[in-house]
Image: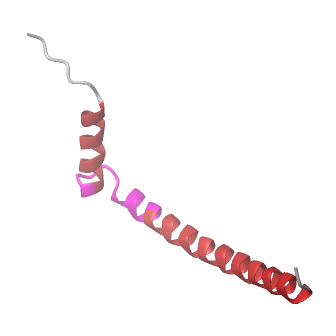
Amino acid sequence: MRLTTVCAVGVAYVLGARAGRERYAQIQVLAQAAAKRMESYGADGSLASRVDHWWSSAAAPSRRDG
């Protein structure tokens, strides 16, 4: 390989890694904000609580006496 090709690949790698870390940090901040919003709903009958209840009942096997 030519030296210029190796240098170009190195620069591209560094720039891509830096952009990847910055985007990861953005996604992490957004995910934490979303988690805090979901926690703020709590068990007060909100959509989050209803979905959690539905998920728990759907995951458990139905037990019918019959």
Residue 45 in magenta? Answer: yes
Question: Which residue occupies the extreme front position in the image?
Answer: 1
Q: Give the range drawn in magenta.
A: 35-47
Percent of width and height locating residue 37: 40, 65
The reply, left or right, for residue 13 in relation to residue 38 is right
Residue 63 in magenta? Answer: no
The reply, left or right, for residue 24 in relation to residue 2 is left
Q: Looking at the picture, tell me which residue is in the foreground, 19 or 41.
A: 19
Give the color scheme: rainbow, by chain, secondary structure or one colour.
secondary structure
Q: How many circles with numbers are drawn on the protein?
A: 0
Q: Which secondary structure dominates the residues rendered in magenta?
A: helix
- Residue occupying the point 89% across, 85% down: 2
Percent of width and height locating residue 21: 68, 73
Question: Which residue occupies the extreme left position in the image?
Answer: 66
Q: In which quarter of the image is the C terminus?
A: top left
- Residue occupying the point 79% across, 81% down: 9
Residue 46 figure quarter: bottom left
The reply, left or right, for residue 64 in relation to residue 44 is left
Q: Looking at the picture, tell me which residue is in the foreground, 54 or 2.
A: 2
- Residue occupying the point 24% across, 49% down: 50
Percent of width and height locating residue 40: 39, 60
Percent of width and height locating residue 22: 65, 78
Question: Which residue occupies the extreme bottom position in the image?
Answer: 4
Q: Looking at the picture, tell me which residue is in the foreground, 44 or 34.
A: 34
